[in-house]
Amino acid sequence: MPRSDNLTGALLMMGSMAAFTLNDAMIKGLAGQVPLFQVMFLRGVVTTILVALIAWKMGALKRHLPREDWGPVFWRLVGEIGSAYFFVTALYHMPLANISAIMQALPLTLTLAAALFFREPVGWRRMAAILAGFVGVMLIVRPGTEGFNIYSVYGLAAVAFVTLRDLATRRLSRDVPSMLVTLFNSFFIMAFFGLGSLTGEWVALDGRAALLICGAAVMIIGGYLFSIMVMRVGEISFVAPFRYTSLIWALILGWLVFGDWPQTLTLVGAAIVVASGLFTLYREAQISRRAKADLKRQLSLGPRPR
């Protein structure tokens, strides 16, 4: 029996989340051994070479970036670089599951930001879900408690920069090849961390460190390619909730590899964030279906007689 598009999309989304989380675990595995800027620069070198090869094979290098997309691409780069710095710094100093749980607030912040900056309508149900989600985030970071530190703030900053990146992505025209934008991002992230690495010491890599860096580069490219493939199959409303499987991967890897297990309040906060995000995605899907049904009804009625 052939697999449905929705099931294929769900498997691709779970594969994407697994690849991204494995990348995070490999990077975190180098904490205390290799300086952060050196790790990110070396991973950037490998990633940029691989992305350039893929973009060349896909013919993306022959395309030109339209002038009207320069602004969105610039702000997307700002979001990518900022999120990479704050996220990886927090990752180096926080349990994997904790920083992953904070990042699950992204669908909520994106919905709120789209309402504030793009005037997209947000009803009281989704606004209530967003507020509940932020309560969950506060349970995860717990400001004012002994477990709170500057790296919790770094995690929140990473969410803000990823939100900026995704808002800028919405402004890109359909003529911009995804792999070309990815190549820009990879190159400038490599350049940023390369310049930063000049201010600190470098260490010699052993076989394990080199393998982890190369593995992280392969995983992050795999995660991106899977996420592109997701957009081509299945219904977004069905596939999108499977992004939260990244938290399951983070819990498993954090426990098996690093011996970390979140406190009960962290797990409760993560559950609230995930539930709020799922409800927000559900409401967005409902509104989208309703709008499509109304448009179809209007088209079926035809133009009004003059």
Image: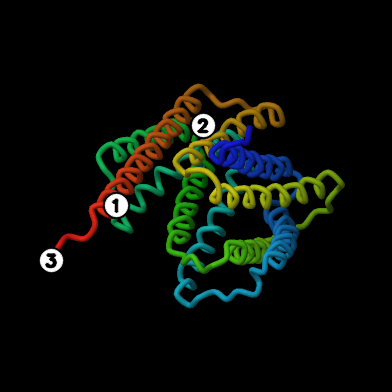
Q: Which residue is mark 3?
A: 306
The image shows residue 59 at horizontal and vertical percentages of 67, 69
Q: Secondary structure at mark 1?
A: helix
| Image location of residue 201, percent across then percent down | 75, 58
Residues at marks 1 and 3, CA–CA distance in whole angstroms: 21 Å
Which residue has dot 2 on it? Answer: 147
Q: Residues within 10 Å of mark 3 (few under 14, many from 20)?
A: few
- Determine whether, in the image, residue 262 is placed left or right of residue 296: right
Tell me the residue at 34%/35% (across/down). 129
Q: Check the image and name the residue furthest to the left.
A: 306
For this view, does 261 lie left or right of residue 280? Answer: right
Q: Which residue is mark 1?
A: 295
Q: In what element is the residue under mark 2?
A: loop
Asked if labels 3 and 1 touch by Cβ distance under 8 angstroms, the answer is: no
For mark 1, does the 10 Å Cα neighbourhood hold few (<14), some (14 to 19), or many (20 or more) residues? few
Question: Which percent across, then down, holds residue 186?
Answer: 64, 61
Residue 42 drawn above or below residue 211: below
Q: Nearer the viewer, residue 152 or 18?
A: 18
Which corner quadrant of the image does residue 290 belong to?
Answer: top left
Q: Nearer the viewer, mark 1 or mark 3?
A: 3
In the rendered structure, which amino acid carries the disc numbered 2?
Gly
Res. 199 in view: no
Q: Amino acid at mark 1?
A: Leu
Nearest the viewer among 139 and 15 is: 15
Marks 3 and 2, Cα distance to the nearest angstrom?
70 Å
**Residue 231 in view (yes/no):** yes
State the separation of the CA atoms marked 1 and 2: 51 Å
Check the image and report above or below for 121 versus 138: below
Residue displayed at 35% across by 48% down = 112
Residue type indicated by callout 3: Arg
- Asked whether the beta carbons under mark 1 and mark 2 sit within 8 Å of each other, the answer is no
From what the image shows, is residue 78 above or below residue 19? Answer: below
